[in-house]
Image: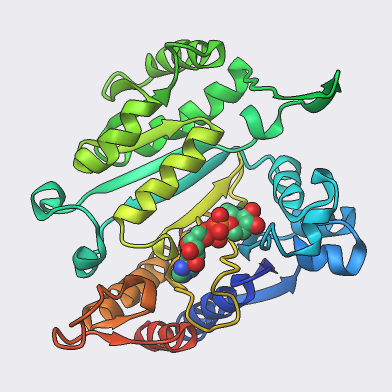
């Protein structure tokens, strides 16, 4: 049996980090006799350069025929890239929103846990970190502000813009259910984050989450306002198990959570639909500021590949092998620059490595 993997390298650091994830998959294939077939799919700025649009219908069709997708990241520097002279619906990010919608990838899982080896890269105090934290962020991915109606108009020389924030009870129910199912396999606690004190969509969110919770009486459910949650994530991240939230809040809170892990370069993600199909990508973007320098952290991309094996292909042993290899390489003291704690690191035995060296070390350790 072979596994057909769509590979979206994307822009900026995307191709660099995807290369390293493929090294890990190739090692898994060799060691565990798994047959992975890769198919390159263009999306983002690289697709605009070839086809004039960030995602073609053929690319969507190709993605649909895959068993899972491994992705880097898309986009460029908004100030300098010609892609941002196009109308918003033709820019790289439109491709990302389109593929999420087309493949119905409504649940985005972002695990935020602290590798003990990266303690020194975490900006929180030791007494806050304690024995570490392990939060699974479940972000709704195909609704809310990013998909609502958008409009800008000018009256008497005054510009006004609107973005619609809409959620149906079905959209809320299915992602809430996903979060409760995940919590059942973890510590049975869900914190649902909203802004129910001012937003109507959040009041509906809370009501539907409460209703869905009735099916999971063993789970402790807490509602938290998003502004408080942003604060609690740095005050006491240990209090969270599964953190469930809507699209934009999840986008922002997960970037915050990635920084307390040490770097956004270490946070993977899985975007899932109702089936075993998923799209796996680092939580960060295309990092145009470091693209082409060979210094990007490939860990998020590599662990995203491990999540693909776990969630889409049910290959637990292989996924564990990749994650253990990442831990071993970190324990051996290897670091890309984003997770080097700074001056004096060499003295405590840490060694700075490039993107490709980190990928080689992890593949070798599998
Ligand atoms: P970003 O995540 O690309 O970068 C933010 C900061 O994190 C930068 O300093 C960058 O160097 C650093 N960083 C990110 N990934 C890293 C890695 N693997 N190793 C080391 N450092 C890393 O966010 P941004 O600068 O706001 O956005 C840049 C572009 O990426 C934009 O075009 C944006 O739209 C796009 N973007 C794409 C995705 C995606 O493809 N899913 C997600 C977010 C942003």
* Percent x, y of residue 186: 28, 41
* Percent x, y of residue 345: 20, 82
Relative placement, left or right, of 113 versus 11 is left
* Percent x, y of residue 21: 52, 75
* Percent x, y of residue 249: 48, 33
Front position in the image: 223 or 107: 223
- Quarter of the picture containing the C terminus is bottom left
- Quarter of the picture containing the N terminus is bottom right
Examine the rendering and report whether any part of residue 365 can be seen. Answer: yes
Which residue is situated farthest in the right direction here?
51
Which residue is situated farthest in the front direction here?
157
Examine the rendering and report whether any part of residue 116 can be seen. Answer: no
Q: Residue at x 18, y 82 (%)?
A: 344
Quadrant of the rendered structure where residue 215 is? Answer: top left
Q: Residue at x 13, y 47 (%)?
A: 128
What's the image's color scheme? rainbow
How many numbered dots are placed on residues in this image? 0
Front position in the image: 107 or 1: 107
Q: Residue at x 42, y 71 (%)?
A: 299
Front position in the image: 236 or 62: 236
Quadrant of the rendered structure where residue 38 is? Answer: bottom right
């Amino acid at each position: 049996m072979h596994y057909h993997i769509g590979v979206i390298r994307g822009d900026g650091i995307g191709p660099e980090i995807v290369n390293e994830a493929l090294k890990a998959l190739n090692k898994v294939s060799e060691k565990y006799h798994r047959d992975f077939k890769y198919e390159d799919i263009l999306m983002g700025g690289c697709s605009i350069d070839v086809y004039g649009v960030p995602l073609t219908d053929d690319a969507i069709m190709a993605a649909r025929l895959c068993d899972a997708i491994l992705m880097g990241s898309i986009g460029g520097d908004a100030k300098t890239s010609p892609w941002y002279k196009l109308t918003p619906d033709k820019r790289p990010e439109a491709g990302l929103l389109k593929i999420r919608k087309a493949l119905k990838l409504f649940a985005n899982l972002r695990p935020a846990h602290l590798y003990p080896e990266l303690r020194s890269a975490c900006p929180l105090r030791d007494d806050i970190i304690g024995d570490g934290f392990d939060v699974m962020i479940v972000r709704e991915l195909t609704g809310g502000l990013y998909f609502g109606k958008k409009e800008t108009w000018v009256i008497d020389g005054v510009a006004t813009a609107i973005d619609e924030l809409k959620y149906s009870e079905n959209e809320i129910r299915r992602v809430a259910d996903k979060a409760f199912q995940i919590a059942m396999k973890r510590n049975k606690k869900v914190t649902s984050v909203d802004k129910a004190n001012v937003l109507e969509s959040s009041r509906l969110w809370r009501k539907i989450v409460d209703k869905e919770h009735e099916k999971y009486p063993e789970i402790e459910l807490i509602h938290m306002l998003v502004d408080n949650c942003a604060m609690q994530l740095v005050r006491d991240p240990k209090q969270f198990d599964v953190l469930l939230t809507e699209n934009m809040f999840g986008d922002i809170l997960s970037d915050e959570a990635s920084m307390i892990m040490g770097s956004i370069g270490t946070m993977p993600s899985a975007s899932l639909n109702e089936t075993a199909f998923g799209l796996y990508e680092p939580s960060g973007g295309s990092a145009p500021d470091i693209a082409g320098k060979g210094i990007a952290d490939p860990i998020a991309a590599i662990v995203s590949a491990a999540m693909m094996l776990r969630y889409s292909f049910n290959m637990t042993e292989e996924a564990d092998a990749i994650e253990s290899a990442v831990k071993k390489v970190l324990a051996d003291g290897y670091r890309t620059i984003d997770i080097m704690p700074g001056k004096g690191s060499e003295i405590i035995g840490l060694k700075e490595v490039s993107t490709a060296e980190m990928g080689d070390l992890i593949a070798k350790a599998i």
